[in-house]
Image (tube, rainbow, N blue to C red):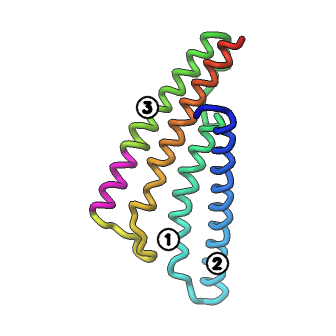
Amino acid sequence: MFSIEFKENLDKIIGWLLIFLMGSMVLNVTWQVLSRYIFQNPSSFTDELSRYMLIWLGMLGAAYVAGQNQHLAIDIVLRKLEGKAKMKLQILINVLIMVFAIAAMILGGSNLVYITYLLGQKSATLQIPLAYIYSIIPASGLLVLYYQVAGIFHLIKTKTQD
């Protein structure tokens, strides 16, 4: 479950999904501009679709970047530490990210999905249930949680091999 091969395969899947989303978003926005300014007949769905693709792109991108350990961080203290102290601080950082992912993304996102599902809210133009759109929030939270736990296992494994 926390093997390097599994993580690399998950990274590839998410990476390709991000490429697909970004490419689709570029095509969607290009069509939006063409239909509005060239054909003088604006497409009704492209604005909403690009907004929802941006939500998915941002949330999946955040999970992917967390998995690559490339997220924004103030690492002044971490760079100055060495050995066991550095490992303990890195584990603490991973745990804090996990707490955020559980509280805000998984629990908060699940609550948002549940409420919008119960209320039956749909998008204005596409008539897609908003619960489907917002489902990426807890899904990304689960990905962030997985990546942080895998990171802790990797830290402990590499430290015990030294």
How many numbered circles does the render carry?
Answer: 3
> Tag 1: Cα neighbours inside 10 Å, few (<14), some, or many (≥20)?
some
104 to 34, vertically: above or below: above
Q: Amino acid at mark 2?
A: Trp
Q: Amino acid at mark 1?
A: Glu
**Tag of residue 48:** 1
Dot placed on the residue nearer the N-terminal end, 1 or 2: 2
160 to 131, vertically: above or below: above
**Tag of residue 133:** none
> Tag 2: Cα neighbours inside 10 Å, few (<14), some, or many (≥20)?
some
Q: Main secondary structure of the magenta part?
A: helix
| Range shown magenta | 108-118
Q: Secondary structure at mark 2?
A: helix
What is the CA distance from the residue labelled 1 to the residue labelled 2? Answer: 13 Å
- The quarter of the picture where the C terminus appears is top right
Judge from the rendering whether residue 134 lies leftward or rightward of residue 45; answer left or right: left
What is the CA distance from the residue labelled 3 to the residue labelled 2? Answer: 41 Å
- The quarter of the picture where the N terminus appears is top right
What is the CA distance from the residue labelled 1 to the residue labelled 3? Answer: 32 Å
138 to 121, vertically: above or below: above
Judge from the rendering whether residue 143 lies leftward or rightward of residue 111; answer left or right: right
Which quadrant of the figure has residue 4? top right
Magenta region includes residue 90? no
**Tag of residue 31:** 2
Q: Amino acid at mark 3?
A: Val
Q: Residue at x 70, y 13 (%)?
A: 161
Q: Residue at x 64, y 67 (%)?
A: 24
Whole-percent x, y for residue 48 in the image: 49, 71
Residue where numbered disc 3 is placed: 99
